[in-house]
Amino acid sequence: MSKPSINWHERAAVLKIDGRPLIGGRRVEGLSGEQFDCISPINGKSLGSVTRGQAADIDAAVASARAAFDDGRWARKPPASRKRVLLKFAELILAAKEELALLETLDMGKPIQYSLSVDVPAAARCIAWYAEAVDKIYDEIAPTGPNALALIQREAMGVIGAIVPWNYPMIMSAWKLGPALAAGNSVVLKPSEKSPLTALRLAELALQAGLPEGVFNVVPGFGHEAGEALALHRDVDAIGFTGSTRVGRKMLEYAGRSNLKRVYNELGGKSAFLVFPDFDDLKRAAQTVAGSMFFNQGESCNAPSRVLVHADIADEFMAMVAAEAPKYTVGDPLDEATVMGALVDEGQLRTVMGYIESGVADGARVLAGAKQTRQASGGYFVEPTVFEAQPQMKIAREEIFGPVMSMMRFKDEADAVAIANDSPYGLQASVWSSHIDRAHRVARALRAGTVHVNQYDEDDMTVPFGGYKQSGNGRDKSLHAFDKYTELKTTWLRIN
C-alpha cells in the first residue's frame, strides 16, 4: 500500500517554532531581547518570533566555540570517534525529514516535494560523506634527504564562522558543517534572517547525536549585525560564506579590519548554457535548461540564466524552451504536486519584477511568463519567464536570482565563447555538442569552475563546487573542502 498523503497545511497550523539562539549546548535568550518576525513567503504571514542576534550574542557563541576547541572535547577526539557522532547526526537528519522539510518550505517557499526529496537527503548525505572521509585521509612525509624527516599534517583551524544564504538553508549549512566539524573545528553558524529555522533545529539534532556542547552554535540575526560581528570577530579563525558578491567583498574587508582571518567566499553566478547546431537532441537540451533554470524558483547561484544558441537553430530552440516554461506551474508550496513555489520575500519579488520590467524596457522579447501571480495568496510568486535578449542588456548580465532566463544568438564558436566569458562571474557553464573535439575545446575555453557537457546540474558530493572570478574562491564539497578548514603544519626532525 502507498503511504497516505500528508496534510501539510494541518501540520503547518500547529507548528511552534523556537527562534532562540543555541549557544553552549542549550537554547538561550538573546542578550538584547530584540526579536524579528519570521515571515513565510507562502502567504506573507509570521511563523513566529526569532531572536535578532547582536554582537554580544556572537561574542558568547564564539567564546563557547573557542572553549570547546581549546579543551579538545571534539578537536582531540580520534577521527573514528568524530565519524561515529557525525554519522549519527546524519541519521537523525533523515529521521526528522518531514519536520525539517516543513520548516524549510514554510521559511523560504520551495515546494514541499523538493524539500523532502532533495534538501533533507542532500544535507544528510553531506554530513555522512565527510564523516566517512575523515578517517581515510592520510598525512604526508616530504621527500627530504637522509638526515631529515619532515612530517606534513593537517590540523583543525579552530573556530569557524559559517554564514549561509536563504536559498538552500540546510544544504548550504551542511556544506560548511560537514568538513569543518569532521576536521575537528568548532563552528558558529549565522543563518540568513530570511530562513533561520532549519539551522537552529540542526544544532539540536547534532547535540542529540553526541556532538559535545559548544562545538556547534547557531545565532540567528541580520547580516549587518550578527553576520558583521562574526566576520569581524578576532577570535574567529576562518569565515565560510555563501551569498552575494556584494557581501562577499565585505567579508574580505572585515578580515582586513580584524585578524586577517581566512575568508572563503562562494558567491554569485550568471552561468552560460551554449547550444551548438551539431547537437542531435535539442528537445532534451530544452527540457534540461528549463528544469535547471526554474528549479528552486530560479533562486540558485548556478542557474543557467544565459542561454546562448547558434543562429541556425535559434528560432527552433527558443520555441522549444518557451513551450517548456508553462509546465513549471506556480502553485502552493505545501501541495505535493507543486513544482514551482514562492520567492523568499517581498524584497526579492520586487527585485525580480524590476528586472523583468528592465528587460521589457530594453527591448527584450518576452517568450514566456513575465508576470507576478497568485497575489490573492498574500505570497510572493512569479511566473517562469523567458526572454530573447541581447548580451549587453541588464537582464543578460546581472544575477537576478529568480525564474528569469535570457536567450541570445551567436554566430560561431568563437562568438559563443566570447559572450560566455564576458561576465564578472565564472561559476558554471554548459556545452551542448555531439562533436567531442568541440565539446573539449569549448569546455577548456570557458572560464568557469564547473563545465557540464550535454547535461546540467548532474552532481555529487565527490566533486568540488565553486567558481572563477567574482564567483568566489575555495571549493565546497569533495575532499578539497578540507583545505578551507585545516592548517598545514610541517614538523621537521633532524636525524643524526
Image (spheres, rainbow, N blue to C red):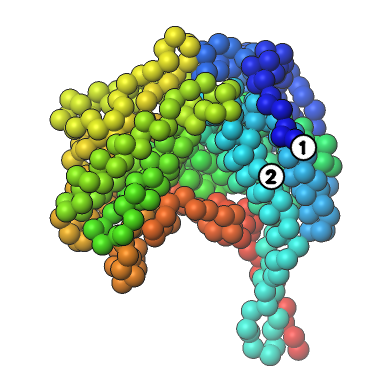
Between residue 247 and residue 166, name the one nearer to us.
Answer: 166
Judged from the image, the secondary structure of the residue bearing numbered disc 1 is helix
x, y percent for residue 226: 58, 27
Residue 19 image point, x, y percent: 68, 20
Could you classify mark 1 by the number of other residues whose Cα lies within 10 Å: few (under 14), some (14-19), or many (20 or more)?
Answer: few
Instruction: Quadrant for residue 141, please give it.
Output: bottom right
Q: Position of residue 10 (x, y in %)?
A: 68, 15
Is residue 308 visible to the viewer in this orientation of the structure? yes
Q: Tell me: residue 350, above or below residue 387.
A: above
**Does the CB distance between marks 1 and 2 fall below 8 Å?**
no
486 to 35, vertically: above or below: below
Q: Is residue 308 left or right of residue 427?
A: left
Position of 11 relative to 457 (above/below): above
The CA distance from mark 1 to mark 2 is: 10 Å
Q: Residue at x 43, y 41 (%)?
A: 291
Residue at screen point 25% across, 33% down: 367
Dividing the picture into quadrants, the one containing residue 258 is: top right
Which label lies toward us, 1 or 2?
1
Q: In the image, what residue type sits under mark 1?
A: Ala
Q: Residue at horizontal 48%, vertical 45%?
A: 266
Question: Farthest residue in the front direction?
Answer: 1
Sequence-wise, the earlier of marks 1 and 2 is 1
Q: Which residue is mark 2?
A: 124
Disc number placed over residue 373 in the picture, else none: none
* Nearer to me, 76 or 368: 368
Q: Which amino acid type is marked by label 2?
A: Ala
Residue 156 shown left or right of residue 484 in the figure: right
* Residue occupying the point 71% across, 34% down: 2
> For numbered disc 2, what is the local secondary structure?
helix
Which residue is identified by label 1?
Answer: 95
